[in-house]
Amino acid sequence: MNKVLKNDHTEETLFEVAEFFKVLGDPTRIKIVSALFENGELCVNDIVNLVDVSRTAVSHQLRILKDKRIISYRKEGQMKFYHLDDAHVEVIVLLTITHLSHH
Amino acid sequence: MNKVLKNDHTEETLFEVAEFFKVLGDPTRIKIVSALFENGELCVNDIVNLVDVSRTAVSHQLRILKDKRIISYRKEGQMKFYHLDDAHVEVIVLLTITHLSHH
DNA sequence: TTAATAAGTGAGCAAGTGTTCACATACAGA
DNA sequence: TCTGTATGTGAACACTTGCTCACTTATTAA
C-alpha cells in the first residue's frame, strides 16, 4: 500500500485499447471479422449469408469496422470486396480463442 | 463467390470471444486490468486512486471482471487484494497496444 | 457495544448501441 | 433510358450499460 503504484500506460492509450476491444466486442462484428480472416476476401452478400444478419445491419457494422481501420475494401464493378486491414487483428482474435478454450 | 465459404469457428465460440472483448472494451475496466498487471496485486482503495473513478463504480466493475474470470481476489482482514486470474489477458492487452501503436 | 474502515448491493436514470424500415446511390445490361 | 442488382444511409426505437445515490455487510479497534 505504501509502495509506489505504477500506471505506465497513459489514459489516452488505454482509451484507444478499450475502443478497439469495444468494436470487436459485438457478436455481429466478431462474426464478420472471423469470416474475413477465414476467407480472405468477401463481398457484402457473402458476409450476409455467413453471419446470418440482415443486409442493412451488416452494412452498418461494416462501416464501423472500416472507420476503426479494422477492415477495408476493394471495389470491382458494383461489388465491394472486404478484407482485414491488418494481420494483427487475426492474431489477437485467435489468441483470445485459445485463451478462452483453456478455461 | 462460388467457392466454398468457410465458417470454422462456431457461433458459440465467437459469442464468447465477443463477450470477452466487450468486458475489456470499457475505459474503466481496461484501466483496472492495466493497473493490476502493472502492480500485480491491489486493494480496492488503491484501484480507486489509480483509475480515478468512484469507489462504487469500481466495485461494480470489479464484480463484472470477477464474474468473467478475468480477475480474482485474496482476502486479508477487511481488505480484498485483487489480481489478474490469467496471464493470457496481459498478453492480449499488450499485443493490442503494440498493434495500435503501429497505426 | 460502539465507532470507524473497507467493500459491496440495488434501484434509478441518462447516455449509448444495434437493429429495422424506408429510402438513396451506384453500376451494369437490355 | 429503364430495370435490376449491390450496397449504403438516416431516423426511430427498444434494449443495454455505466454511473450515482442511499443503504448494507464485514471486520477491526476502542
Image (cartoon, coloured by chain):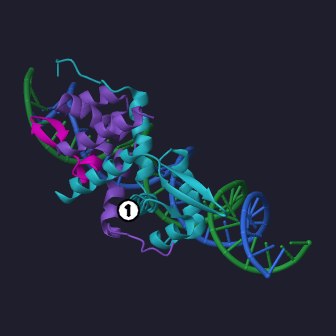
Chain colours: A purple, B cyan, C green, D blue
Residue C2, by quadrant, is: bottom right
Q: Could one spot residue A56 in this view of the protein?
A: no
Q: Could one spot residue B88 in this view of the protein?
A: yes
The verdict on residue B57 being magenta is no
Residue D28 picture location, percent across and down: 72, 69
Q: In this view, does D26 lie to the left or right of D9?
A: right
Which residue is identified by label 1? Answer: B38
| Residue type, mark 1 in image | Glu
Nearer the observer, A43 or D19: D19
Give the residues in magenta: A63-84
Residue A56 picture location, percent across and down: 34, 38
Residue C17 picture location, percent across and down: 43, 51
Residue A87 picture location, percent across and down: 18, 42
Dot 1: few (<14), some (14–19), or many (≥20) neighbours within 10 Å?
Answer: some
Q: Residue at x 40, y 28 (%)?
A: B11
Q: Which chain carries label 1?
A: B
Q: In this view, does B35 lie to the left or right of A33?
A: right
The verdict on residue A68 being magenta is yes
Nearer the observer, C1 or A88: C1
- The quarter of the picture where the C terminus of chain A appears is top left
Q: Residue at x 23, y 34 (%)?
A: A36
Instruction: Determine whether the residue tagged by mark 1 lies in a helix, strand or loop.
Output: helix
Q: Which residue is drawn at 31% across and 60% down?
A: A16
Q: Is residue D30 above or below residue A20?
A: below
Q: Residue at x 38, y 47 (%)?
A: B87
Q: In this view, does A66 lie above or below B11?
A: below
